[in-house]
Amino acid sequence: MERVTAAPAQPPLRLDDLDAEQAAAVRAPRGPVCVLAGAGTGKTRTITHRIAHLVASGHVRADQVLSVTFTARAAGELRNRLRALGLGGEAGQVQARTFHAAALRQLKYFWPQVVGDVPWRLIDGKFPLAAQAAGRAGLPTDTDSLRDLISEIEWAKGSLIAPEDYAGEVGRRHRDVPYDAKKVSAVYTYYEALKTTPDGLLLDFDDLLLHTAAALEDYSSVAEEFRGRYRCFVVDEYQDVTPLQQRVLDAWLGDRDDLTVVGDANQTIYSFTGASPTFLLDFSRRFPDATVVRLERDYRSTPQVVSLANRVIGAARGRIAGTRLQLIGQRADGPEPTFAEFDDEPAEAAAVAKAVAKLLGNGVPAAEIAILYRINAQSEVYEQALTEAGIPYQVRGGEGFFNRPEVRQAVSALRTAANRDDLPDARGEKLVVLVRAALAQVGLTKEEPVGVQARERWSSLMALVQLTEELAEQDPDLELNGLLRELAARAEARHPPTVQGVTLASLHAAKGLEWDAVFLVGLADGTLPIQHVLGPDATVSDEAALEEERRLLYVGVTRAREHLQLSWALARSAGGRKVRRRSRFLIGLVPDDSPASRIAAHTTERRAGPKRQHPTCRICGRPLLTTQATMLGRCARCPADVDPELLVALQEWRREKADELSLPHFVVFSDTTLTAIAEQRPADDRALVAIPGIGAKKLQTYGADVLAIVRSRLRDSS
Ligand code: ATP
Ligand code: MG
């Protein structure tokens, strides 16, 4: 084994915070190492310690190590953990990057040797070129269609499929494509051709990888220089590697074998990008001398969570499933995961917000709580419920509902409709029809469309229609302008929080992360597994895609350290028809004594009581249905009993406070919350937190000030 003569940068690393198998992977001599293990078993921890060990024992210099992963967040996580081991991200240190970032650096350096003085530029995004290419091929050029075409191009490039082979490969793999494969192939061909311009070459992200591989494959001087510089390679989350990334990795290695990979085939959830766990599973076939380590001890989650994770993945089928290991929980016992069924999504979201508030009250930090769902459009109802409960949150891996481009476009289409001279006086059912017609202008179709992006957009538009249905049912007098005011109030109430809040994220965005408490929501059949992997009559149309959906649930369950709740709703909107069923993946997992198992009793109990999900008006006692009404605690039509002087005093205080803290005014309190305080004149902490929009954090920060202002006003006026 080669030893580097430079003095070790670090004292030998202590390995006593690793278990025997982790330590075996860490201590394995330089050469191929593969860690195949389930979630939470310390794979990421093992590779960072292995790097530190190789450096500390003088086997490799820190700056000769290149560690790669797939997302910027994951690369950041690697760098943090390396820094904690004394291997910071500065020059001369271990490199921890995404594949793309590593390739970009290398290409910049090697380009003059390879291509000479032909200028090149990295394009910001594929849209403009894809639009030109789609136009030439006679396909639509709206945003959704382009997104779907771009996904196809990215899948093909990631899978190393050339434009001329695209149609054949799609047929061979029975791939579900948004348009005729020959047309997509034409778009792909035009797209590639458009990147050669008189001013030089345009490169997209995939080209960075392709050109890097080609430079190393075709130019021995480049390969020699690179291989002299980097000697040791490490890949985290290796189950997500695409054939294109693998080609780059092979070019980096040449005929060497100093490669450590770690991954969990049962967490493969990015197949749609061309990623495949085959490279991980076949590693020891390719490198027969490889040290292969399997880890089974789960250090992340309680035995209760681990047991559920084992049962979820235990039902998996196919080759990947054959590689799973039974995880063994190492932590102390915790609460059993809970299952909960609700009549409708707003009720589910309200209950989750309440459970989150309880955890916060018990001292669990907001940053340690996550609500995870299958598609981004599901965030809307949770954003709403958390806002009403005054709980700060952040939406990860997607924008907040009202910031999404399609929702902005939809609201603007509704505004245009409202400004028309011939606006009909539409209320109730007619308002819903009017809204549907306006949203048809921005792409709302009757049937759910085929492409992934188009579906996501469609779901957001449908969420707006359902919101309209709900509001129109609750307030039969609501007309379009009233609806627009309500949407504006909802958007205003949801400005991003300044403090770190509860995480809302899709299951895809949650991979590799961990939280103390996790809520897996919307676990209805047709959402997870998602509708398009199911055929008519809910039969399975695509077995492999169904298994990927099951792995998503496994990824979700294994994010939780301690608290885990799984829930679903029988109807989408409040009072809607209960046509849904719990996810087929939950069959056999919900304990018999769980309240969620007593569906009939549970439903009757809910029906018998008042509409619990909606608070009532403090003046007339009717249910409150709009955000503004809920925050004010009264119907819009009931008389306002606001104390104008108190309101002015509160506004004055808010202005000073916001300036003092350098915050926008609405972050301190929204106008509606201030009005609610000026109407309700709370006398103590309890009365103050009863006002929606005021949670524990706001009470702590501003409660004393606000109560003092109210008290002083009451004294003045008595
Ligand atoms: P995933 O598959 O989700 O990426 P992973 O296998 O990479 O998970 P890590 O994130 O490395 O797992 O570890 C999970 C948690 O367990 C982390 O909080 C980590 O610090 C802790 N952990 C790992 N190994 C040990 C150990 N030997 N002793 C104590 N804690 C450990
Ligand atoms: Mg990891």
Image: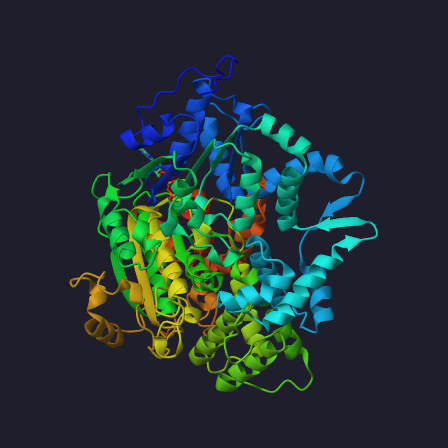
Q: Is residue 327 visible?
A: yes
Q: Nearer the viewer, residue 635 or 330?
A: 330
Residue drawn 39% across and 63% down? 544
Q: Is residue 349 above or below residue 5?
A: below
Q: Nearer the viewer, residue 449 or 686?
A: 449
Return the residue found at the far left.
593
In which quadrant will I find the C terminus?
A: bottom left
Q: Is residue 84 above or below residue 78?
A: above
Q: Quadrant of residue 408?
A: bottom right
Residue 427, position in %: x, y? 52, 84
Q: Is residue 141 above or below residue 518?
A: below
Residue drawn 32% across and 39% down? 41
Q: Nearer the viewer, residue 692 or 498?
A: 498
Q: Is residue 426 above or below residue 671?
A: below
Residue drawn 79% across and 43% down? 119
Q: Is residue 703 visible?
A: no
Residue 583, position in %: x, y? 32, 66
Residue drawn 41% across and 23% down? 53
In which quadrant will I find the N terminus?
A: top left
Residue 535, position in %: x, y? 40, 75
Q: How is the image coloured?
A: rainbow
Residue 166, position in %: x, y? 59, 63
The number of discs equals 0
